[in-house]
Amino acid sequence: MTKPLFDTLAIIGPGLIGSSIARAARAQGAVRTIVATARSPETRKRVVELGFADTVTETNAEAVEGADLVIACVPVGVCGGVAKEIGPHLKPGAIVSDVGSVKGSVVRDMGPHLPKTAHFVPAHPVAGTEHSGPDAGFAELFENRWCILTPPEGADQEAVEKLAAFWRLLGAKVEIMTPAHHDLVLAVTSHLPHLIAYTIVGTADELGSVTRSEVLKFSAGGFRDFTRIAASDPVMWRDVFLNNKEAVLEMLGRFNEDVSALTKAIRRGDGEALTEHFTRTRAIRRGVIEAGQDTDAPDFGRPHGHDD
Ligand code: NAP
């Protein structure tokens, strides 16, 4: 068994991501003790029943007392409020992190509430599913997935290394970048695809001449994968778009230009332009598989787990 990297881990918001971290940390012996807390009594009760935490507290403040590593696993828009609550109760030397899908806003909202004696190292595990809540988590979620750390300027190097080691122990590959760069990269690789999925599933639903049963029946023709993505948590994704507004609008602008170009090619019957475009995108898909980020298996070989 590995020597634990931390004595006590506090998870605030043990939903899909938080409960997966707790499960994986326990499975790998990454920490000695796990404390969890959730805002709703229902979730707290469920966490006790599931048993992936040693202690379940009622408040965020209680959860972080004595914790060496604190990870906020709540929607991005809630992170600032959580930091305000826990700030005065953090142990000197504690590492404070999060898992939010947007990093600039988290640094902006959490940073000012944290004491100088704590080390703030924001993180984003690029792994997830469309399911939510403590039952949805599983220990293998982060295996072979990226976890991006976005330490603020002047961050304690030892704390950054320790958090990186924690994520590696959970099976993730770690990359470090600035919050702004993270938000730009994720805007095109995750946020825009989610917006497209939300749009197209809504469009299909509103079609009068194609019945809903036909949409469901023939969904394997491409629509099905969009419905999976569009089933992702509405609150989480509302917060992503509200908090990564500029980068998403920039990518959306480029996307709209490309859609216009393809629209023109279809209208003009320009088969050459279409073939050229689709050939280029096919090569990108091959690159994704070669990078080990997906499989060539039918159904994308994906009973669970995708990147968010
Ligand atoms: P989740 O399963 O819905 O869990 C969210 C947790 O946050 C729950 O414990 C919930 O408590 C708590 N929470 C929600 N609203 C709150 C509020 N207003 N105040 C306090 N606590 C609140 O969500 P998740 O998928 O784990 O996502 C959590 C974070 O991970 C988000 O920041 C998201 O951007 C990020 N992330 C998600 C994915 C993904 O694929 N889902 C991937 C990478 C990163 P209750 O149960 O008591 O409501």
Image: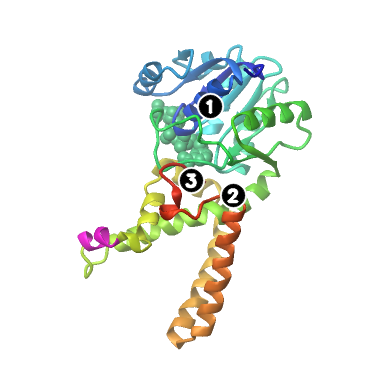
Tell me the quarter of the picture where residue 217 sits.
bottom left
Tell me the quarter of the picture where residue 161 sits.
top right
Amino acid of disc 1? Ala
What residue is rendered at 64% in x and 27% in y? 166
Sort mark 3 into few (<14), some (14-19) or many (20+) by Cα contacts within 10 Å: some
- Asked if residue 75 can be seen in this view, the reply is no
Amino acid of disc 2? Gly
Q: Secondary structure at mark 2?
A: loop
Amino acid of disc 3? His
Q: Secondary structure at mark 3?
A: loop
Residue 24 is tagged as 1
Question: What sort of colour scheme is used for the picture?
Answer: rainbow
Sort mark 2 into few (<14), some (14-19) or many (20+) by Cα contacts within 10 Å: few
Q: Secondary structure at mark 1?
A: helix
Q: Is residue 27 above or below residue 234?
A: above
Q: Position of residue 259 (x, y in %)?
A: 49, 72
Is 155 left, or right, of 131 in this rendering?
right
Q: Are marks 1 and 3 in contact (CB under 8 Å)?
A: no
Is the residue marked 2 within 8 Å of ligand 1, measured from its CB?
A: no
Task: Give the magenta range.
Answer: 212-218
- Mark toward the start of the polypeptide (2 vs 1): 1
Comparing 166 with 15, the one in front is: 166
Q: Which residue is mark 2?
A: 292
The quadrant the N terminus occupies is top right
What residue is rendered at 72% in x and 30% in y? 160
Is the residue marked 3 within 8 Å of ligand 1, measured from its CB?
A: yes
